[in-house]
Amino acid sequence: MQALRTAPEGAIFVLHASAHNPTGCDPLYSQWRSIAQIMKERNLFPLFDAAYLGMVSGSFAEDAAPIRLFVNEMNMNVAICLSFAKIMGLYGR
């Protein structure tokens, strides 16, 4: 949160939508809301790494909730890096 508060306006932050790598710590939805609010107020740009959708909760939709928060609720522009390389083997069986 400190990094968000002190970054220069327009800075780009890479955020993991779910299954945070390397920490393994996923923010609660209320924490995502705080992150989104600071980023919007400070005009910071979110770049989501969404390589692990479905691996945390078992639901693509649930794991993508942070992205929908930024786009739909906070009305922010975002970039999304989406990869299925790591998860298609899990769901293809």
Image: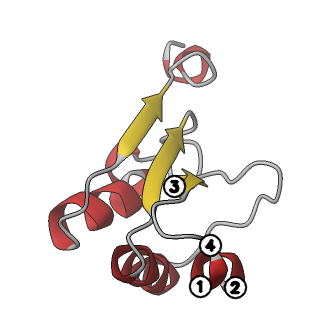
Amino acid type assigned to the residue bearing label 3 in the image: Ser
Instruction: Look at 46% across and 86% down and name the residue there.
Output: 34
Residue 36: % across, % down: 40, 75
Which residue is identified by label 1?
5
- SS at circle 2: helix
Query: Viewed as shown, does residue 6 lie left or right of 43?
Result: right
The answer to whether residue 26 is above or below residue 17 is below
Which residue is identified by label 4?
7
- Return the disc, 3 or 4, that comes first in the chain's sequence: 4
Amino acid type assigned to the residue bearing label 1 in the image: Arg
Q: In whole angstroms, how far apart are the C-alphas of marks 3 and 4?
A: 31 Å
Query: Viewed as shown, does residue 70 lie left or right of 17?
Result: left
- SS at circle 1: helix
- SS at circle 3: loop
Q: In whole angstroms, how far apart are the C-alphas of marks 3 and 1?
A: 30 Å
The answer to whether residue 62 is above or below residue 38 is above
Residue lying furthest front: 8
The label nearer to you, 3 versus 1, is: 1
Amino acid type assigned to the residue bearing label 2 in the image: Gln
- Location of the N terminus by quadrant is bottom right
Question: Which disc, if any, is residue 2?
Answer: 2
Which residue is identified by label 3?
57
Q: In whole angstroms, how far apart are the C-alphas of marks 2 and 4?
A: 8 Å
- Return the disc, 3 or 1, that comes first in the chain's sequence: 1
Amino acid type assigned to the residue bearing label 4 in the image: Ala
Q: Marks 1 and 2: in contact by CB < 8 Å? A: yes
Instruction: Look at 35% across and 55% down and name the residue there.
Output: 67
- SS at circle 4: loop
